Image (cartoon, rainbow, N blue to C red):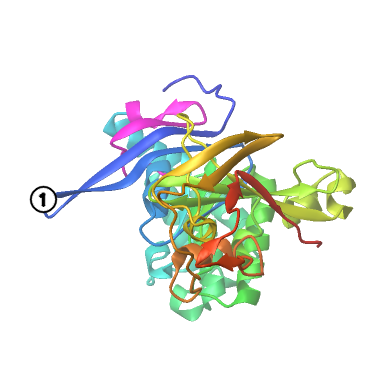
Amino acid sequence: MTEQNHEHFIHCTGLVKIFQVAGLEVVALQGLDLEVERGEILALVGPSGSGKSTLLSALGGLDRPSAGKLEIDGQNLLKFSQIELTAYRREQVGFVWQQTTRNLLPYLTAGQNIELLMTLAGSSAQERQAWAAELLEAVGMVEYAKQKPPQLSGGQQQRIAIACALANRPKILLADEPTGEVDWPTAQRILTLLRDLRERYELTIVLVTHDPRVAEWADRVIAIRDGRTSTETVRVASNGIQAASDGAAAHSSSTAHAEASVHFEELVVLDSAGRLQLPGDQRALAGIGRRARVELVDGGILIKASDEDRIEVTTADPETDAEATYHSLYSADPPPAPAPSNGRVKGSWWKLRWLRKRTE
């Protein structure tokens, strides 16, 4: 194992994953860069096939990237042997899946499901019983310890699944659509539970979601498109300092962040080579095709449509356009309609950095 002294808890650089499908190569991750702080709750969003689940599998040691650098708590996972990778999964990572059938064995009680994982890790009976009891109390399911999954509601099953994910006392909790099969009130209770457990057990949580409401509970939201990090959204307090999420603010010793009005700041992410992705709907609104003009201006950079490659402005359909769907994560309002001139945008350009404000 490498020495654990990296400044970021999760550090990915140039991460590449190539799958062989029917004799063809499919590139799921295309040089992805990502940094996550210790104790952070990070939400990953993006269209289907963008690489979210592939990244989650890489972080959990379920799949080995083809190239790049992947460090978690100072450990370089790409240098792990298969035995070391198995030990990493068993000792440092907790998983929560959308399908409860993947989380729990239906013929075991809630308590037995939790204890089973500790049995596989070689814990004694006394240790298993004590830790299972604490986890059941932590997720508010003590009275359901002897119930089997089919006797529980979807939300109750997911609470037990979270307890199972913590059975090995992990440092990182990975959740793939943890609220995908429950209603919103139940989802809110699960999200509140995750925040509480983050504080109680010093967890770093990375979750994949398609629900904008879930994403807004995270400290940061990273949008992934075409196997790369595209945009990052953070909460910023009125004093200009990055604010904690709703839940984290409630636990913060500083009341300034909790009481101050907060707006969301969405940033385009540049990779280690300085490349960036502009969201498809914004490129379309600006009339930017394959090439664009870049100009230095006071306080920033402007990207403008090239006269030779300017495209006709189209209106995104939120029902069918995946990019428009993820644009709505950061604003309840649709993108502002451009002022067309003969099918073109007058003075079209796009800032690398923009703000969307919402008072809470």
Furthest toward the left, the residue is 23
Q: Residue at x 60, y 70 (%)?
A: 187
Spot occupied by residue 285 in the image (x, y as percentages of width and height): 54, 61
The relative height of residue 331 versus residue 185 in the rendered view (above or below) is above
The image quadrant of residue 193 is: bottom right
The relative height of residue 2 versus residue 298 in the rendered view (above or below) is above
The relative height of residue 12 versus residue 252 in the rendered view (above or below) is above
Q: Residue at x 46, y 69 (%)?
A: 109
Q: Residue at x 31, y 44 (%)?
A: 63
**In the image shown, does 225 or 335 lie closer to the viewer?**
335
Total numbered badges shown on the rendered structure: 1
**In the image shown, does 283 or 260 lie closer to the viewer?**
283
Q: Is residue 291 magenta?
A: no
Spot occupied by residue 296 in the image (x, y as percentages of width and height): 62, 33
Spot occupied by residue 144 in the image (x, y as percentages of width and height): 57, 72
Region rendered in magenta: 60-79
> Is residue 141 visible from the viewing direction of this image?
no
> Is residue 70 visible from the viewing direction of this image?
yes
Q: Secondary structure at mark 1?
A: loop
For the N terminus, give its image quadrant.
top left
Q: Is residue 70 magenta?
A: yes
In the picture, measured across the screen, residue 317 lies left or right of residue 197, that is left
Q: Which residue is mark 1?
A: 23
Spot occupied by residue 318 in the image (x, y as percentages of width and height): 51, 73
**In the image shown, does 360 or 155 lie closer to the viewer?**
360
In the picture, measured across the screen, residue 274 lies left or right of residue 262, that is left
